[in-house]
Structures are given as structure tokens and as C-alpha cells.
């Protein structure tokens, strides 16, 4: 026990290593090394395919259906992570009684967690494989105040001013830049006045270099883009979305100042990830 705790502590005191973190995430999904190599090879081919497509709506669906069916193989066992999401600080920030759209909802774990907290939630994803798992979990848990739909993030099939909150986690990096812009315009349209879009996406400066990340942003770049789209103000999450940390929102200007010192914070993994500098974690207000 003592040795394992010391090893865990030493891991966090080492310098930031994006490749190691990406590998850890893949291993958590249950992939062995051979499968990880195969999955990365598929991602390289899929990246070239997506970037060469003029109309990508069906291409996104084809790629992510194949990714989840043949490599990541989603399974209802992910229900065991649901409790972690229910007590998630972002869920605490949203609260209860809100209309929430979860964009790129995957297997629907976050959507279900938000619904269990008393919100009405609609989860959308481009992959019908993911949506089928989400619908299975909804039925299994007997949650009535959540719906799931197959939908492209660039064409949100909802009336204007429909939602109090939008949230996307690990979505926009999987879109080409022109599709990110189209998505943000749609997000602004379906968000109610004074509503908020919580957007969490890997920071380009973290250096993840994942093939299916078609366009990554820095905090500064994403803040400027959100303002140019028409969001009235932006707030940044100061600390990482860990259960034992409360939510602290700060000016994006302050977070950008920290981002410009990213080489200093990368000297230890704990400082870089505690300040959530490996991600752009922003809340855009309409």
C-alpha cells in the first residue's frame, strides 16, 4: 500500500508527458498494446479521410461508428462510472431544474448524471452506436427526464433559445475548423439568453498529438473565437474538474496568463493538470 502510494505521488511529481497520459487513457479503456497500435493506425487513416472530405456529416458518422464497434467497443459496464459524474463539480455548477443539451454525449453517462440531479437533459451524438448504448442505460436506470438522439453538432435540430446550459466534453477537437465555427453558431442559436455553454477540449499546447483531433485550440484562441461568434462573455475554470475541488471561475485573461507560462507548469504533472492547463475549460455566456 505504502509503495503504491509513493509510486502514485512520484508519477504526479514528474514532468508533464502528453504521450504517457494519452496512453494511460487508452489503457483505462481496456485496450492492450497491440490494440492501441491498431487503433492509432485507424485514427491516422480516418484523419486523412475526414480532412479530404468536402461534406463530412456522413463521414464523421462512419468513422466514429467504426471506431467504437471495432476498437473502443462501448459497453454498458460504463454505468459504474455514473456516481463519479453525479458528484462532478460541473454538475454541481449546473444545479437542478435546468434544460441541458449534452453535445457529443457518447454513451450518455454525463447526460444521465445530470438527469438524476433533476435536470431535463437531451444528449446528442453523431454515432448511432453510442446512442444505442445511451438508450439502453436510460432504460436500465429507468430515467425519464433524459432523451438521446443521433445528431450532427453542426446542425442542432432544436428551436432557438431552447436550453439553459449546453455542455460538450472532448467534442470540438474532433471537428475541422469550419465545422467548429458552424457548431458554435448553432450552439449560440439554441442557447437561451444568459444561458451558458460549458466547453471542455484539449489544449493544443499540451501536445497530445492524437490523429483524430482535427483542430485543437489554446485557451486564448478559443476565447477569441467564442467572442467573435457572438457570446457576450467568457469565464474560465481555474482548477481541474476533480471531485474534491470546488468550482472556481476566473477571467479568461488570467487563465491565458497562466497558459503563456505553460512550460513552467509542465515541470510537474500535478501543477499542469491541477490548473487544468492541458485543457481549454471555458464557460461562454449568451
Image: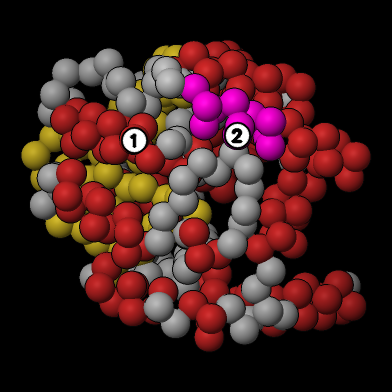
Please tell me which residue is depicted at 73% across the width and 31% down the height of the picture: 42
Which comes before the other along the chain, label 2 or label 1?
Answer: 2
Locate residue 274 relative to residue 47 in the image: left or right: left
Residue 101, percent across and down?
32, 30
Locate residue 237 relative to residue 29 in the image: left or right: left
Please tell me which residue is depicted at 32% across the width and 64% down the height of the picture: 220
Locate residue 243 relative to residue 181 in the image: left or right: right
Mark linked to residue 47: 2
Is residue 64 on the magenta stretch? no
Asked if residue 143 shows in the view, the reply is: no
The residues bearing labels 2 and 1 have C-alpha atoms spaced at a distance of: 15 Å
Locate residue 96 relative to residue 113 in the image: left or right: left
Q: Which of these two is toward me, 149 or 49?
A: 49
Which quadrant of the structure image shows residue 252? bottom left
Q: Which of these two is toward me, 10 or 81?
A: 10
Q: Is residue 20 above or below residue 209?
A: below
Start-end of magenta stretch: 43-53
Amino acid at each position: 500500500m505504502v509503495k503504491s502510494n509513493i509510486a502514485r505521488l512520484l508519477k504526479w511529481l514528474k514532468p508533464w508527458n502528453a504521450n504517457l497520459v494519452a496512453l494511460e487513457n487508452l489503457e483505462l479503456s481496456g485496450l492492450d498494446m497491440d490494440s492501441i497500435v491498431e487503433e492509432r493506425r485507424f485514427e491516422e487513416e480516418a484523419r486523412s479521410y475526414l480532412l479530404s472530405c468536402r461534406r463530412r456529416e456522413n463521414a464523421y458518422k462512419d468513422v466514429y461508428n467504426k471506431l467504437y464497434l471495432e476498437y473502443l467497443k462501448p459497453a454498458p459496464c460504463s454505468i459504474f462510472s455514473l456516481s463519479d459524474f453525479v458528484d462532478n463539480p460541473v454538475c454541481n455548477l449546473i444545479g437542478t431544474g435546468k434544460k441541458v443539451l449534452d453535445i457529443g454525449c457518447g454513451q450518455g453517462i454525463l447526460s444521465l448524471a445530470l438527469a438524476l440531479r433533476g435536470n431535463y437533459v437531451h444528449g446528442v451524438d453523431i454515432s448511432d452506436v453510442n446512442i444505442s448504448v445511451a438508450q439502453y442505460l436510460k432504460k436500465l436506470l429507468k430515467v425519464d427526464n433524459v432523451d438521446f438522439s443521433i445528431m450532427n453538432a453542426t446542425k442542432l435540430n432544436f428551436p432557438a433559445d431552447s436550453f439553459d446550459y449546453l455542455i460538450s466534453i472532448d467534442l470540438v477537437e474532433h471537428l475541422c475548423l469550419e465545422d467548429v465555427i458552424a457548431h458554435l453558431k448553432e450552439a449560440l442559436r439554441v442557447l437561451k439568453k444568459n444561458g451558458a455553454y460549458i466547453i471542455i477540449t484539449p489544449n493544443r499546447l499540451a501536445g497530445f498529438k492524437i490523429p483524430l483531433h482535427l483542430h485543437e485550440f489554446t485557451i486564448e484562441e478559443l476565447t477569441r473565437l467564442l467572442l467573435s461568434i457572438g457570446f457576450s462573455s467568457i469565464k474560465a475554470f481555474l482548477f481541474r474538474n476533480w471531485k474534491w475541488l470546488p468550482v472556481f471561475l476566473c477571467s479568461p485573461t488570467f487563465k491565458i496568463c497562466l497558459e503563456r507560462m505553460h512550460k513552467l507548469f509542465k515541470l510537474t504533472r500535478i501543477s499542469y493538470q491541477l490548473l487544468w492547463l492541458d485543457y481549454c475549460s471555458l464557460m461562454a455566456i449568451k
